[in-house]
Structures are given as structure tokens and as C-alpha cells.
């Protein structure tokens, strides 16, 4: 049995995972602890309680997915959306408290491992998993191995530059994929197309754009088409680097279903290099969104 932990900006979730299923869950607040040690204590307590409630199987390992986590060092490095501004060696802190091996990894890489082990990418040793939400995360599995790179931070599809001197990105540069196909990026595209009176954007997320597109709003339909084109180019570029057999798409934006997938398939077919035509398929994750992060974290621990 593996304890999977997903560290989020406000809430951290825990799940006991066995045979690809989340058997029991818990959650604690990420905010409101005196420091990172108090947070680790609370996390370990919640983990202990879960393990004690399941008295049949011993805990083998802990896997933790977190933003800005480095799998090579086991450290969360100055994550902008987490309360600690210093480096937090959370892998070691949890291993000490729970007395089992602990692996910490980037949340996008955790999602990729989760899809590879339990989801739509099961058994596919050349896989790209892309998370489309507030940001754009990705994990590359190449020749049956998760790519970490020389410093543990490889696989940042969201920050590949797509448009020279394009939109401002959160990383400080301009024109990144994330500035176009994240929730924020899609909302910006809609606002640009619809002019300053983009009333539907008073609701959060991309759901209002999806609703408007379903109702025939031409700007909303075009927003999905433009976003699909940008994403298709980014994915086709990524294919040139690692030659995946499958690309699994995951995250809040994918709830818009065919509104994005149909134009994405079309654009992807147009921009994919000829030697890859017919050899890469695009799939939407079939994992429950709540479980995916926990399964992914557990997959980190199970490596
Ligand atoms: Zn960027």
C-alpha cells in the first residue's frame, strides 16, 4: 500500500492507494501552520490515521506531488503558490516521520506517472501527458522512463515559446504556450476577440466560454479554434523531440470536451510532421480528476 499526497496551494490531499485504487482519503489545510515543520507534522498525523484505519496492509512508501518539486533533490524549491518561501526538503521530512521511503516529484510529472501506470497511458512507454488548467504542465515518458533532465526540471511544455514577443507569461518572458492555452490564456483570447465588453467572463474558468460556444457565440467558437491551433502546434513540436505514441490531455480545460478536441484533432493532423502522421494519438484522461493527483503521487512512490 502506498500513501499518495498531493500538495496544493490551499488544501493538501492524502490517499491510500492499492492496486490503482484510492481506498481512503483525507485532507488538511496547506495554509495556517506555524512553519513547514508544523505542516509536515500535520501531514504525517493525517497519514498515520489513514494507515491505522486500514490494519491489513503495511505501508510501503510515500509519494508526494507538489508544485516546484524537484525529484532529484526531494525539495520543494521556492514555490510561488505555496506558503513557504524557503526550500522545503519534504521527501526527507515525510520519510523521517512515517519511517518508509518517500519520493517527492513535480505535480505534472506525478500526473504523467499516474496516467502511465493507471490511466489512459497504461503500458505505453513513449508518452506525453499534458495538464491544461490554471497553468500548462507536462510530463514526458521516453523509452519507459520519466524524463527529469540534468537538474530535475525537464518537461516544461507550458513555457516553450510559441509566439515571439507574444503575450506576457507568468515566468517573466513573452509568448509561452501557457499564455495562450491555459484558462487565463483562453479567457484572454476571448476578451481580445469579443472586445472590452466580454460580459460572460464574469464567471470563472473556461466553462462560460464553453457554454457560449454551445449557444453559437462566434467569438467563443473561435476562441476554442484558436486555442486548439496553438496547442496543436505546441504538441506537434513536442512530438518532434520525443516521438510519443500517445498524448494524454488532462485538467479543467478538457471538461469542454469536443469543443476543444475536435478542432485540436484537425489542427494536429495539419501541423504534425509527415513521419509521425498516423502514429500519435490524442486521448483525454479517463481518470477521475480528484483521484488522478493521488494516483499520480502514489505512482511516484511506487517507482
Ligand atoms: Zn512562460
Image: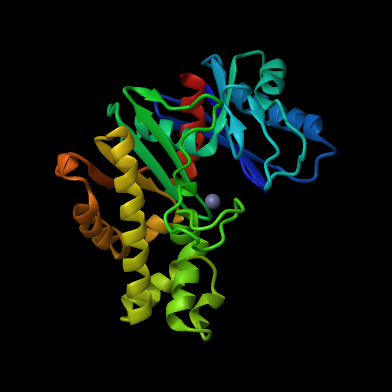
Number of numbered discs visible in the structure rendering: 0
**Residue 199 seen in this snapshot:** yes
Name the residue: 26% across, 38% down: 246
Relative horizontal placement of residue 209, taking residue 246 as reference (left or right): right
- Quadrant of res 5: top right
Relative horizontal placement of residue 282, taking residue 110 as reference (left or right): left
**On screen, residue 83 above or below 150:** below
Residue 71 image point, x, y percent: 56, 25
Name the residue: 28% across, 35% down: 244
Is residue 71 or residue 117 the one in the foreground?
71
- Quadrant of res 79: top right
Name the residue: 32% across, 33% down: 242
**On screen, residue 233 above or below 129:** below
Name the residue: 29% across, 40% down: 239
Residue 110 image point, x, y percent: 48, 33
Is residue 247 or residue 63 the one in the foreground?
247
Residue 277 image point, x, y percent: 15, 44
**Residue 1 seen in this snapshot:** no
Residue 166 image point, x, y percent: 49, 62
Is residue 172 or residue 115 the one in the foreground?
172
**On screen, residue 193 above or below 144:** below
Relative horizontal placement of residue 256, taking residue 201 as reference (left or right): left
Amino acid at each position: 500500500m502506498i500513501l499518495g499526497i498531493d500538495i496544493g496551494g490551499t488544501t493538501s490531499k492524502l490517499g491510500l492507494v492499492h492496486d490503482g485504487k484510492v481506498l481512503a482519503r483525507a485532507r488538511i489545510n496547506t495554509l495556517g501552520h506555524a512553519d513547514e515543520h508544523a505542516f509536515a507534522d500535520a501531514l504525517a498525523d493525517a497519514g498515520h490515521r489513514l494507515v491505522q484505519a486500514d490494519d491489513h496492509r503495511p505501508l510501503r512508501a510515500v509519494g508526494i506531488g507538489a508544485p516546484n518539486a524537484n525529484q532529484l533533490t526531494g525539495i520543494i524549491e521556492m514555490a510561488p503558490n505555496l506558503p513557504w518561501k524557503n526550500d522545503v526538503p519534504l521527501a526527507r521530512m515525510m520519510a523521517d516521520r512515517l519511517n518508509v521511503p518517500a519520493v517527492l516529484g513535480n505535480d505534472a510529472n506525478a500526473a504523467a506517472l499516474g496516467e502511465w501506470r493507471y490511466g489512459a497511458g497504461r503500458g505505453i512507454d513513449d508518452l506525453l501527458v499534458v495538464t491544461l488548467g490554471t497553468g500548462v504542465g507536462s510530463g514526458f515518458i521516453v523509452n519507459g522512463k520519466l524524463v527529469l533532465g540534468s537538474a530535475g526540471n525537464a518537461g516544461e511544455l507550458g513555457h516553450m515559446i510559441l509566439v515571439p514577443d507574444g503575450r506576457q507569461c507568468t515566468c517573466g518572458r513573452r509568448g509561452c504556450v501557457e499564455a495562450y492555452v491555459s484558462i487565463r490564456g483562453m479567457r484572454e483570447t476571448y476578451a481580445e476577440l469579443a472586445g472590452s465588453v466580454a460580459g460572460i467572463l464574469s464567471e470563472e474558468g473556461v466553462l462560460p466560454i464553453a457554454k457560449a460556444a454551445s449557444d453559437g457565440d462566434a467569438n467563443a467558437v473561435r476562441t476554442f479554434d484558436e486555442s486548439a491551433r496553438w496547442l496543436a502546434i505546441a504538441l506537434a513540436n513536442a512530438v518532434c523531440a520525443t516521438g510519443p505514441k500517445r498524448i494524454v490531455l488532462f485538467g479543467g480545460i478538457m471538461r469542454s470536451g469536443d469543443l476543444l478536441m475536435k478542432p485540436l484533432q484537425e489542427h494536429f493532423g495539419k501541423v504534425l510532421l509527415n513521419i509521425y502522421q498516423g502514429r500519435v494519438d490524442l486521448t483525454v484522461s479517463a481518470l477521475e480528476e480528484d483521484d488522478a493527483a493521488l494516483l499520480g503521487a502514489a505512482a511516484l512512490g511506487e517507482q
